[in-house]
Amino acid sequence: MPNEDLKKSEPYSPWYNRYSDFAGGYTLCYPLNMKVDASLSEVRTVFSNAETQIEVYADRLDQGSNTASAYLHDYDQFANNKQDHNIVTDSYFSSNGFDIHLLKWSRHKLATVPNDKNNYVSIELTKNSIDAYTILIKSTDPITNEMQLLASFQALPKKGVAGIYQHYSPTKHPLNDETTAFQKKFFSENSPLRWGMYEPNAPEDFDYLTHLEASLDYTFPIVIRYQSLDENFPAASLKNAYDHKKFVELSLQTFHYKQNNQSILYDILDGRYDDYFNNYAQDVKTFGHPILLRLDNEMNGLWCPYAGYFFSKDSDLFKAVWRHIYDIFTANQVTNVLWVWNPNDESMPRAKWNSFLNYYPGNDYVDIVGMTGYNPGTTVAGEKWREFADIYDPLYAKYSRLFDQPLIIGEFASSSVGGDKPAWMQKMFDQIGKYDRLKVAIWWNHCDFDADGNITHPYRMDDNLAEIETFRQGLAAYPEAPAETTDPTKTLPNTAQKAPAKVSTKTTTTPEKSVKNQKNR
């Protein structure tokens, strides 16, 4: 049929089979002793045995940042980290109708990763301004046959549509009684949508959020707390939230705020942070109350120091870090955590090796799946006004098809620059109620700043009365809103005396090559 996702594997020689991917538009030879996994055909095909894994990605380029030149030259910036990566070959050439970049390197074996594949070859190929491919090889031993593999690679006329043939379901793990009740109330099939708020002073100080809640006639049951590896478990902050009858989406991000993070995932997987995470897990256990632990969110964005962009384009390292931390919590018998996996809606870079699905750590490790997409407005060149439905209709459709876990919007907001923000909010409230699998949506009530401290993305929803009134009316239909509403002008916070924006560990350093500074917070 015209739209079939057809693959064909056939004998080629006594040592190789030939694999043809018609939707991907390529064919290559692979060793006979390798298994073929095309379950994520839309993203990649994987050929593997115990020692070696070959990943093939077929990309369609656009005319923006993801050009043929960028594909060949800009996606291997991790190689600048000579401390951790031993570059063997870095060459550009043309062959068989392709422009090619071949990079070969190794790193040390990681102490906590069994059968660590620490030898790499990445081959990027562009055929024209539209079609591009990446072949990523990982092996426990030095790789010697990359040129034979490359010689066998040929383009095919594309025919059919690639699909995704995986479906993800959560695995139950022990929870204490209070967390079980929290999970049932907030994340069961019949739980209604509830709202959360990131306010930069909370949960340490709730004065401003309390005033904001009075203006909105709504009590937010969930707040966000960001932290890096520069601090231990913020027990006092979470206790203050609990005393105010609020739960915390604790966004633990594995980097240091003002340090070089080029080795951070390697250091974690070498066990250098085991004492930190063991102590952290014990403190979480002592706290005892429910926590939404959102570990290393937006990992498919190059504004995050733990992204695969900085670590050999190897998403398996991110998954190994997630599992390692999870296993430490399990060993410490932590039973008050729900694990939230939360990619960004757009992968940056836009190459398929950076697809969000490559970062999924496994059904045993994810309780809740988060979505995040912002309307950045038009302040920054290359960004545009994005309506809520344009972001979340396709995102919700994809996530609800792939994942059985409850869905949340881990953070989101709209800029005030480039369109009508109250109208955006009204359309958002009109639309969001249709997402019946969505259980929590958290507004990010702050701003993005550039390196000089200038606001690039004004995301607050309380900059003027029109925004507050639109939000108040929208929230009236949801739990935690009182039966009787009040005049918002009676309790409207004094915007001239707003709580100052607190510098938090969410701020990250955006790479020089970044085409997006939306997350430079």
Image (cartoon, grey):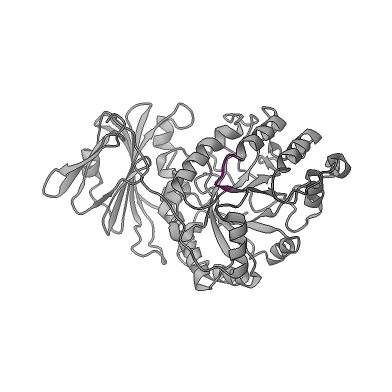
Report how many numbered discs are placed on residues in the image.
0
459 shown above or below 195: above
Residue 41 pos. (x, y %): 34, 42
Q: Could you tell whether 260 is left or right of 475 in the image?
A: left
Answer yes or no: is residue 346 visible: no
Does the magenta stretch mainly form a helix, a strand or a loop? loop
Q: Residue at x 25, y 52 (%)?
A: 35
Q: Could you tell whether 106 is left or right of 211 in the image?
A: left
Residue 498 pos. (x, y %): 82, 45
Q: Could you tell whether 229 is left or right of 488 in the image?
A: left
Observer-nearest residue: 507 or 99? Answer: 507
Observer-nearest residue: 336 or 481? Answer: 481
Segment tinted magenta in the rendering = 434-438
> In terms of image quadrants, where is residue 392?
top right
Q: Quadrant of the N terminus?
A: top left
267 shown above or below 163: below
